[in-house]
Image (tube, helix red, strand yellow):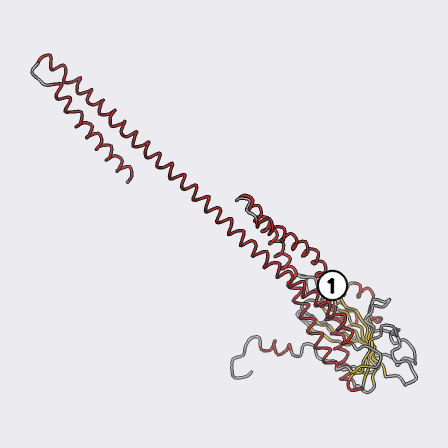
Amino acid sequence: MPPFPLHPQRDRLVGELHARPLAPLATPATLSRLAMLVAPGADRAADIAHLAALCRLYGVNEPAAEAIHFTADFGAFQLRYERHTEFTGWTFLKPLPTPPAGQDPFDDTAIDALPRDWLAALPGQAIAAFHIALIPEPADEEPRFAGLPAEGLVASTLAGGAGLVGTDFRIHPDGFARFLVLDGGLGAARAGRIAQTLWEIETYRMMALLALPIARGAAPQLSEASERLSALASRARGSGGLEHDRAALAELSDLATGIETMAATTAERFSAAEAYRTLVAQRLDALAEVPIPGLPTLREFLGRRLDPAIATVAATGTRIARLSVRCARAVDLLRARVAVAQEAQTQTLLAAMAETGRAQLRLQETVEGLSVAGISYYLVSLASYTLKPLQSTQPHLPVEGALSLMVPLVAAAVWLWMRRRQRRSAV
């Protein structure tokens, strides 16, 4: 151990550089490659369990439970297992006898050595399946690309003329695509590097194209959403009242929700497509192809097919983003107009409430005046009932004058009493 503290992820990060080492490939050989797409949330331990079952069948040491890379020699074939984020790579390799001139080098493939029931139970779904045959470059009089149709052939020279590669990028009756590599002095290390580059190109190409059906499926929805947004914007331009604007806002909000849902469900796949396309371009750079007169290179073929597909995906993503911005802007504008209308309605309601309050105040003042008069009249009447009997016994008493003086005094006292009660009630 070094005499200094280590980051806990140091060994793991260094190991990433060596997780998928290049394997030398001696000529002649045949290689079968499967890329099994893994469903989101699937149990990745199923891959290791399936691999362990094959190891037990052939008496080979089983992989570790957390292994992301595994290679082993099973006698009849060699196996290379790789775990990627979205797919699992299974590569099967076996030596190939040099085929006679003109014989199809794909008659005997590496996957033929695998148990059929084990292959049928492979976890996931095959997104890419292809054979790579590596044979010596034939003599000048022999056909170069036996096993590949002349129509649609894509080929180029590699490694400064030390090798050639040919394919038609088609799925053949056995369900596999085909790549034929002709060795004219490649050497095992360079042949292995070319084979790995080819299977990465084919795998990443297919992974990039996964976004194309999604983009094509989204196109009609985007057109419908754009037309609906334009119609709603035209309707909202005219003022139909608060309820009309509220209804339009509800429709716009529903449309915005649909667009955002579409953006959320496509963004990850679309960004992955661009990342895979970049990987394909890097691997094509690594091949360093030299054209063969009369035949398109792999880069030329994929440039005419893959680039337009990824451009469609990118354009669809841009359409979704722009439509989302347009819809959000329309929602904000209509929401502002609804808010202004609601504020005006609130001001009108408050003005009506204020007028009602003023009317209630006037009514209250009238009732208070009547109350003062009524209570004063009642109190003076009680006083008259008390004082008038005294006048019969004492005629000299000024009862009428006293009652007259009491009226303003009693009224003032009642008014002050009621005001005092109002102040206490307000507190």
Instruction: Indicate whether 240 appears above or below 398.
Output: below
Residue 57 is situated, as x and y percent measured from the top left of the image, at: 79, 69
- Is residue 76 among the parts visible in the rendering? no
Rendered position, 341 above or below 196: above
Specify the amino acid type for callout 1.
Gly
Crowd around label 1: few <14 · some 14–19 · many ≥20 (10 Å): some
Q: Nearer the viewer, residue 86 or 305?
A: 305
Left or right of 319? Residue 240 is left
Q: Helix, strand or loop at disc 1?
A: loop
Residue drawn at (80%, 82%) of the image? 157
- Residue at screen point 71% across, 60% down: 214
Query: 301 or 367, which is in the foreground?
Result: 367
- Classify 204 as above or below 427: below
Asked where in the image residue 413 lies, by quadrant, the reply is top left
Question: The N terminus lies in which quarter of the figure?
Answer: bottom right
Which residue sits at x=72%, y=64%?
A: 210
> Residue lying farthest left?
396
Residue ID for mark 1: 124
Give left or right: position of 107 versus 387: right
Residue placed most toward the observer, 260 or 367: 367
Report the number of numbered marks.
1
Q: Which residue of the protein is positioned furthest toward the front in this rendering? A: 238
The x, y position of residue 128, in whole percent, is 77, 68
Residue 102 seen by the camera: yes
Asked which quadrant contains residue 381, the reply is: top left
Location of residue 365 in the rendering, given as x and y in whole percent from the top left corner: 29, 32
Q: Residue at x 65, y 59 (%)?
A: 265
Using the rendered view, name the quadrant where residue 84 is placed.
bottom right
